[in-house]
Image: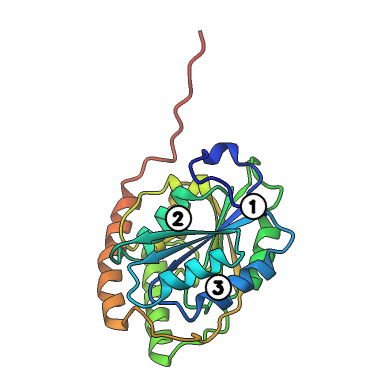
């Protein structure tokens, strides 16, 4: 597959079916293996990979350039001069993406790209239908994290589910498949990636929860602490709850003829 000019409008690039978006900060040791896995999982698929180097201070930038120059024609690289976070990275990648679908993966390699074909099978050919799926949300059924991290996640999921009623057991799972048009209609704010299911539901989009694999981190360290995640998450949670309560998107304006 040849790399296309990024200045070409996304609307005319119909040969890209899925854009794989990977936010990465200091993941130089994980990205080469992860990108090979993406290529293997999507062999025969029409795809591109967009990695956002989110202000890395290690060799991430050099590793990505080496991969691109070494034959990864599907790879596109975006760069932040300083870290802006996962949500902003995904949002910038989505804006640049050419695919109809956005597949998101964490840069640490804990998400398994081998789950992407099964998620694509759930949406293929449904585009444009009244019951079209807008989001396939991954559910880590075998989480490979510390006990404290799993406990904090379970608590946050229960609280979020009770407040937002988003019907998602694992909203923090990094692997998702989202219709690009639906994603770009969502309100942008920092940490929005934790609330994509609730926001899709706010826009009356259909969602499927899909069990996925989860793996130990291959190298590096987590960018989030449990306390930091909890404090920010609770503040955002009430913000999203307020936003949903104030929505009027259930009403459609019909054009009057004559």
Mark 3 or 1, nearer chain start: 1
Q: Decide if residue 106 is in sight here.
A: no
Please give the residue where the numbered disc 1 appears in the rendered image: 2
Please give the residue where the numbered disc 3 appears in the rendered image: 139
Looking at the rendered image, the disc whose residue lies closer to the viewer, 3 or 1, is 1
Bin the neighbour count of mark 3 within 10 Å (Cα to Cα): few under 14, some 14-19, many 20 and up. Answer: many
Q: Which residue is nearer to you in this view: 251 or 225?
A: 225
SS category of the residue bearing label 2:
helix
- The quadrant of the picture occupied by the N terminus is bottom right
Asked if marks 3 and 2 touch (Cβ < 8 Å), the reply is: no
Residues at marks 3 and 2, CA–CA distance in whole angstroms: 23 Å
Looking at the rendered image, the disc whose residue lies closer to the viewer, 2 or 1, is 1
Q: Is residue 213 above or below residue 55?
A: below
User: Residue 241, labelled with which disc?
Assistant: none
In the picture as drawn, the residue positioned furthest to the top comes out as 258
Q: Is residue 182 above or below residue 45?
A: above
Q: Is residue 43 above or below residue 250?
A: below
Classify residue 124 as left or right of residue 90: right
Coloration of the structure image: rainbow
Q: Residue 248: x, y in percent?
A: 37, 40
Q: Which residue is nearer to you in this view: 127 or 96?
A: 96
Mark 2 or 1, nearer chain start: 1
Asked if marks 3 and 1 touch (Cβ < 8 Å), the reply is: no
Residues at marks 2 and 1, CA–CA distance in whole angstroms: 19 Å
Residues at marks 3 and 1, CA–CA distance in whole angstroms: 33 Å
Question: Which quadrant of the figure has residue 120?
Answer: bottom right
Q: Decide if residue 148 is in sight here.
A: yes
In the picture as drawn, the residue positioned furthest to the bottom comes out as 147
Please give the residue where the numbered disc 2 appears in the rendered image: 93
Q: Which residue is nearer to you in this view: 182 or 66?
A: 66
Q: Residue 231: x, y in percent?
A: 25, 74
Q: Residue 162: x, y in percent?
A: 39, 68
């Amino acid at each position: 597959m040849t790399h296309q000019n990024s200045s070409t409008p996304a609307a005319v690039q119909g040969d890209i079916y899925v854009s794989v978006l990977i936010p990465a900060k200091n993941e130089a040791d994980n990205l080469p293996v992860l990108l090979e896995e993406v290529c293997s999982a999507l062999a025969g698929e029409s795809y591109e990979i967009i990695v956002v180097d989110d202000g890395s201070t290690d060799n991430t930038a050099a590793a990505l350039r080496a991969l691109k120059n070494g034959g990864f024609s599907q790879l596109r690289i975006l760069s932040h001069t300083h870290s802006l976070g996962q949500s902003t990275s995904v949002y910038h990648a989505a804006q640049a993406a050419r695919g109809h679908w956005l597949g998101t993966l964490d840069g640490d390699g804990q998400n398994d790209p081998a789950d992407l074909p099964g998620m694509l099978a759930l949406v293929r050919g449904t585009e444009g239908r009244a019951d079209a799926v807008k989001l396939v949300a991954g559910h880590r059924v075998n989480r490979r994290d510390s006990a404290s991290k799993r406990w904090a996640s379970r608590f946050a999921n229960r609280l979020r589910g009770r407040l937002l009623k988003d019907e998602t057991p694992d909203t923090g799972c990094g692997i998702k498949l989202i219709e690009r048009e639906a994603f770009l209609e969502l309100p942008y704010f920092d940490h929005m990636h934790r609330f994509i299911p609730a926001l899709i539901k706010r826009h009356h989009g259909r969602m499927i929860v899909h069990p996925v694999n989860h793996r130990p981190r291959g190298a590096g360290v987590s960018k989030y602490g449990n306390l930091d995640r909890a404090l920010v998450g609770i503040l955002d949670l009430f913000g999203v709850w307020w936003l949903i309560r104030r929505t009027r998107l259930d009403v459609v304006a019909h054009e009057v003829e004559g």
